[in-house]
Image (cartoon, rainbow, N blue to C red):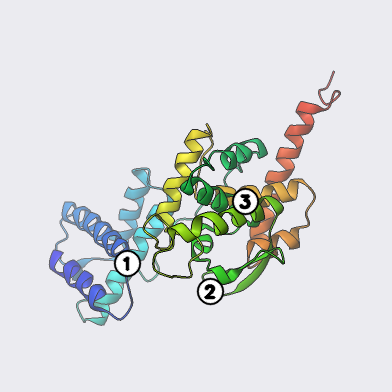
Amino acid sequence: MKEQVQAFINSLQQGSRNRSPLTLQSYERDLSQLLRYLDSEGIGRVQDIQKHHLSLYVLQLKGLGRSAATISRQLVSLRAFFHYLLAAGRVTANPTLHLEPPKQDKRVPDALSLEEVERLLAAPDTATIAGIRDQAMLELLYATGMRVSELISLDLEHVQLMLGFIRCMDAKAKERIIPLGGAAADALTSYLGDVRPQLAKNGGEALFLNRQGGRMTRQGFWKIMKKYASEAGIGSELTPHSLRHAFASHLLQNGADLHSVQEMMGHAGLQTTQKYVQQAKTRIKDVYQLAHPRAKRL
């Protein structure tokens, strides 16, 4: 079966769709793990693989403590592989057709507190080129709630400093207009005036540039964010979207209406935004319990 897996990977590399090297590595890793399981079960031909074999494989992954997100990603690899086998005439049926992925926890991660956000935003050394750029990126994320992928996709034309807003494009090329706060505008002004001209080397339109003059990458930004979180002593569970979660939670805690937050976040429906409401209510209740002189029962 290794030959079929390699043929599948080769077909992806040669196909019209531009698969990233990371995607190809993920498919190869997931399928190699499946082959080891099938080999341990005495199954040596793709034609012999049935749905119940894959169901048992999923159960084994759960037993090994794999998260629902990890298992779902592996099922994507399996479906793509068997779709290829079916199209190539190597199998007569697709055993992944009705294989249900595990339900994923939709809980919104705990948002950073206002104090944690302030420490994070103050961490960059604004006496340096990198520090001025990094502070502008962090301030902009917290001011707008945009996704990291949206941040690094920004071009110069998307910034309207004089009018006080950012034009943001999501993955489906849907545009939204987000107000730009004073602190973020100041940080962007410093970056655009003093730093970006020193980083720009190829005349590109990307807003945020790395040291080589190219567009900032998601991996590059995540490395920067982790560095400043460590320096700021933030022990909370950190993700690339921590400032996005903080943006939504802090707005709701301070009385922003749900529809406005939904629009600024770029959520397709209110259901996703509503997940932040309970978090905001819990935070307000905690503050009340700590601060009100008669909150505790006598």
Q: Residue 126's x, y, as percent?
A: 54, 43
Query: Callout 2: few (<14), some (14-19), or many (20+) C-alpha neighbours within 10 Å?
Result: few
Which quadrant is the C terminus positioned in?
top right
In terms of secondary structure, where does tag 2 sit?
Answer: loop
Residue at the image point whose x is 22% and y is 81% from the top: 88
Residue in the foreground of this view, choosing between 193 and 61: 193
Q: Earlier in the sequence, mark 3 or mark 1?
A: 1
Residue 28 appears in the rendering:
yes
Q: Which residue is mark 2?
A: 172
In terms of secondary structure, where does tag 3 sit?
Answer: helix
Q: Amino acid at mark 1?
A: Ser
Q: Amino acid at mark 3?
A: Tyr
Numbered mark located on residue 142 in the image: 3
Q: Amino acid at mark 2?
A: Lys
> Marks 3 and 1: which is nearer the front?
3
Q: Which residue is mark 1?
A: 20
> Marks 3 and 2: which is nearer the front?
3
Residue in the foreground of this view, choosing between 36 and 24: 24
Q: Earlier in the sequence, mark 3 or mark 2?
A: 3
- Whether residue 45 sits left or right of residue 286 in the image: it is left
Residue 92 appears in the rendering:
no
